[in-house]
Amino acid sequence: VQLQAFGGGLVQPGGSLRLSCAASGRPFPTMSLAWFRQAPGKEREFVAAISSTGLMTNYAESVKGRVTISRDNAKNTVYLRMNSLKPEDTAVYSCAAKTSWTRVNLGTSYNYWGQGTQVTVSS
């Protein structure tokens, strides 16, 4: 599976942004997908995950209520809608994929990764 994330940019605190991750290769509908982020000098952090059917989602406590993960299997794309952005949301956001819905918040459990997209929240 090849993954390509895009949609990052500079946004003011309190603003919104939608990230997209387009996939190709292995049938997209069979994959669980997730977003992770990594800020400078910090470890990679789980953000959100969505099951292959889209019926199950999982969010990190730090973003719950501000972030929505969704997917469009017809477009082979997963989205991350982020609202009420804070400076501490600044990071490189990457998408990841795997075939199971277990340990979805564990980065090392994912087989496929896309290159990240930078999100900067600053006034």
Image (tube, rainbow, N blue to C red):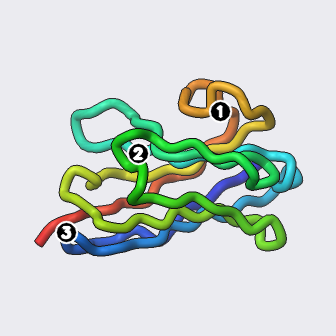
Sequence-first disc among 3 and 1: 3
Which residue was labeled with disc 1? Answer: 110
From what the image shows, is residue 32 above or below residue 44? below
Q: Residue at x 66, y 48 (%)?
A: 50
The three-letter code of the residue at mark 2 reads Arg
Distance of label 3 from label 2 (alpha carbons): 18 Å
Please state the horizontal and vertical placement of residue 103, each as a whole percent of the image. Answer: 63, 25
Q: Secondary structure at mark 3?
A: loop
The three-letter code of the residue at mark 3 reads Pro
Quadrant position of residue 62: top left
3 vs 1, front mark: 3
In front of the other: 58 or 95:
58
Quadrant position of residue 60: top left
Distance of label 1 from label 2 (alpha carbons): 14 Å
Distance of label 3 from label 1 (alpha carbons): 31 Å
Please state the horizontal and vertical placement of residue 8, each as a whole percent of the image. Answer: 40, 68
Q: Is 44 on the left or on the right of 39, as rendered?
A: right
Q: Residue at x 74, y 55 (%)?
A: 54
Residues packed near mark 3 inside 10 Å, few (<14), some (14 to 19) or many (20 plus): some
Q: Is 30 on the left or on the right of 62, as rendered?
A: right
In front of the other: 59 or 112:
59
Q: Secondary structure at mark 2?
A: strand
**Label placed on residue 13:** 3
Which residue was labeled with disc 2? Answer: 37
Q: Residue at x 19, y 68 (%)?
A: 13
Q: Is 1 on the left or on the right of 120, as rendered?
A: right
Sequence-first disc among 3 and 2: 3
Q: Secondary structure at mark 1?
A: loop
Q: Which quarter of the rendered picture does the C terminus lie within?
A: bottom left
Sequence-first disc among 1 and 2: 2
Please state the horizontal and vertical placement of residue 33, each as a whole percent of the image. Answer: 67, 47
